[in-house]
Amino acid sequence: MAEQDTKQIQLRIDESKMNSTYANTIRTSSTQDEVVLDFGMNLPTQGQNNEPVLLFSVGSRVIMNWAGAKRLAISLGQVIRQYEERNGEIVIQAPGGGGAAPEAPKLAD
């Protein structure tokens, strides 16, 4: 069997135009061709009659094709699984902080 030629490609990462933001929530939507991810902050405010309201303030929007979205999902699954193996399961709180969210998603093994 012939030995295959392998070439290494050097990856350079340019962070000179990068912006960092914090997000505590995400909204997803999609089209036939793309996945749209809106990252932002849930900010508690008071509505009419002093009723509590959550305001979702969008800080960043990322639009990607379905292949990129799948690669992101796989990468996130791997990093979350590694974190939970070291630190224990991440408990997802229900909106408003009232305990664990019902039917919290589980990552596949």
Image: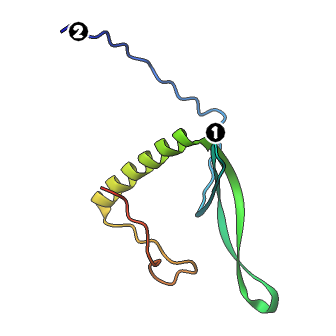
Residue type indicated by callout 1 = Met
- In the figure, 90 relative to 62: above or below? below
Q: Residue furthest top?
A: 2
Q: Residue at x 53, y 29 (%)?
A: 13
Q: Residue 62 or 44: which is nearer the viewer?
A: 62
Q: Residue furthest right?
A: 48
**Where's the N terminus, which quadrant?**
top left
x and y, in percent, of residue 55 in the image = 72, 72
Label 1 crowd (10 A; few <14 / some 14-19 / many >=20): few
Number of the label disc, if any, that sits on residue 88: none
Q: Residue at x 43, y 18 (%)?
A: 9
Q: Residue furthest bottom?
A: 49
Q: Residue at x 58, y 29 (%)?
A: 14
x and y, in percent, of residue 48 in the image = 81, 88
Which secondary structure lies at badge 1? loop
The quarter of the displayed image where residue 22 is located: bottom right
**Where's the C terminus, which quadrant?**
bottom left
Q: Residue furthest left?
A: 1
* Labels 1, 2: front one: 2
Q: How many marks?
A: 2
Among the two numbered marks 1 and 2 on one chain, the one whose residue lies closer to the N terminus? 2
Residue type indicated by callout 2 = Glu
Number of the label disc, if any, that sits on residue 3: 2
Which secondary structure lies at badge 2? loop
Q: Residue at x 37, y 49 (%)?
A: 78
The quarter of the displayed image where residue 53 is located: bottom right
x and y, in percent, of residue 6 in the image = 33, 13
Marks 1 and 2, Cα distance to the nearest angstrom? 41 Å
- In the figure, 54 relative to 27: above or below? below
Label 1–label 2 contact, CB within 8 A: no
- In the figure, 94 relative to 13: above or below? below
**Disc 1 target residue:** 18
